[in-house]
């Protein structure tokens, strides 16, 4: 079986799709994120069911080319594994488009005060998915670098008050290799202007994080397009925080809870980070300590 054909019923995919399958990788913000929830926790939070026999291996460094859990507008009651990095249906060869700009070709300066048109509706790769192929991309947090240093100076960005998992606004598509019959279902995360927290890193973009009450709306393909684009806005900065981590996360094959160990204070004060010999993580928006359990350091 070809690597890109792995599904929830073949639950141990390779960590990355081989480069022989990739024409181009479009790099942008939100190219790495974290999801360490067990599949049962995801099912309960989003009221979905994973196919019988499916498994999900927690990841501290989800990178383009890997398979990740999504909930699609096509099947909103089922949890599925799609490849991170979207290939449009019309492409001659597979490639990874990891982000979709809400503004499309507008706001090239990434002005955080931009309030103009959502050009994503006219982009060739996204004009069909934004109308009928939307998805929730499940995450616990995401990794972001600075504008200049990129992932040489990475931060874990999370939602306060222990809000996890949450959902990015995503788009999906299906690509078929006409020579081999290979089918790839893949997704991209929509980005918008940077909120005040991301600007402090500094970074010029934010992923679109959906308010929980808007998740079902995002999956509703009967929703008018004008209402869809209204959801493409930055998440409130006062409900988020971030702290710096070691640049070892740059390696897309790096894994393990040690990647998330804080190496400095939070962008906005919450409480002190205590580092002990047994490495305790206090950083994901709760007053409790999060020990580095081999299965789940955030104690879900």
Image (cartoon, grey):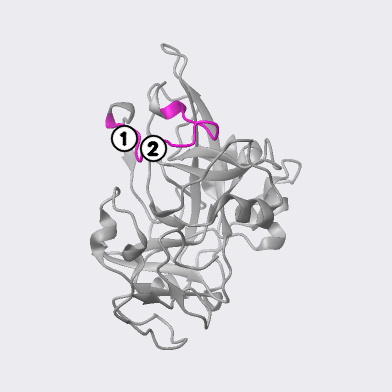
Q: Are marks 2 and 1 in contact (CB under 8 Å)?
A: yes
Secondary structure category for the residue under label 1:
loop
Residue 184, how many percent across, how many down?
48, 28
Image quadrant occupied by the N terminus: top left
Instruction: Tell me the quarter of the picture where residue 249 sits.
Output: bottom left
Residue 207, how many percent across, how many down?
49, 58
Residue 80 shows in this picture: yes
Horizontal placement of 40 versus 31: left or right? right
Q: Is residue 291 above or below residue 249?
A: below
Image quadrant occupied by the C terminus: bottom right
Magenta segment: 4-19
Q: Which residue is mark 1?
A: 24
What label sits on residue 162 in the rendered view? none
Residue 112 shows in this picture: no
Q: Nearer the viewer, residue 122 or 164?
A: 164
Q: Which residue is mark 2?
A: 96
Horizontal placement of 113 versus 254: left or right? right
Few, some or many C-alpha atoms within 10 Å of disc 2 (few <14, some 14-19, many ≥20)? many
Residue 15 within the magenta-colored segment of the rendering: yes
Q: Main secondary structure of the magenta part?
A: loop
Q: Nearer the viewer, residue 221 or 159?
A: 159
Instruction: Tell me the quarter of the picture where residue 161 sits.
Output: bottom right
Residue 45 within the magenta-colored segment of the rendering: no
Residue 183, how many percent across, how many down?
49, 23
Residue 263, how many percent across, how many down?
28, 76
Few, some or many C-alpha atoms within 10 Å of disc 1 (few <14, some 14-19, many ≥20)? few
Secondary structure category for the residue under label 2:
strand
Residue at point 43%, 40% (across, down): 85
CA gap between label 2 and label 1 equals 6 Å
Residue at point 42%, 45% (across, down): 98
């Amino acid at each position: 079986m070809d690597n890109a054909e792995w599904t929830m019923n073949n639950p141990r995919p390779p960590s990355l799709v081989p480069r022989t399958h990739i024409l181009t990788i479009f790099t942008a913000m939100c190219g790495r994120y974290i999801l360490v929830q067990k599949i049962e926790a995801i099912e309960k939070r989003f009221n979905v069911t994973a196919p019988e026999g499916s498994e999900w291996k927690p990841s501290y460094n989800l990178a383009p080319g890997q398979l990740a859990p999504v909930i699609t507008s096509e099947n909103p009651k089922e949890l599925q594994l799609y490849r991170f990095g979207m290939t449009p249906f019309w492409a001659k060869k597979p490639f990874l488009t990891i982000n979709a700009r809400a503004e499309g070709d507008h706001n090239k300066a990434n002005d955080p005060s931009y309030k103009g048109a959502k050009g994503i509706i006219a982009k060739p790769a996204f004009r069909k998915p934004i109308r009928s192929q939307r998805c929730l991309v499940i995450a616990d947090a995401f990794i972001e670098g600075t504008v200049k240093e990129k992932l040489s100076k990475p931060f874990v960005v999370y939602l306060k008050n222990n809000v996890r998992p949450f959902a990015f606004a995503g788009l999906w598509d299906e690509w078929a290799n006409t020579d081999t019959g290979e089918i790839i279902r893949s997704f991209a995360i929509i980005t918008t202007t940077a909120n005040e927290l991301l600007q402090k890193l500094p970074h010029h973009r934010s992923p679109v994080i959906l308010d929980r009450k808007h998740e079902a709306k995002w999956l509703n393909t009967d929703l008018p397009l004008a209402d869809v684009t209204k959801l493409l806005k930055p998440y409130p900065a006062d409900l988020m925080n971030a702290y710096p981590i070691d640049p070892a996360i740059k390696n897309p094959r790096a894994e393990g809870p040690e990647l998330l160990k804080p190496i400095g204070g939070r962008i906005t004060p919450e409480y002190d980070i205590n580092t002990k010999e047994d490495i305790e993580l206090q950083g994901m928006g709760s007053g409790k300590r999060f020990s580095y359990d081999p299965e789940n350091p955030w104690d879900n």
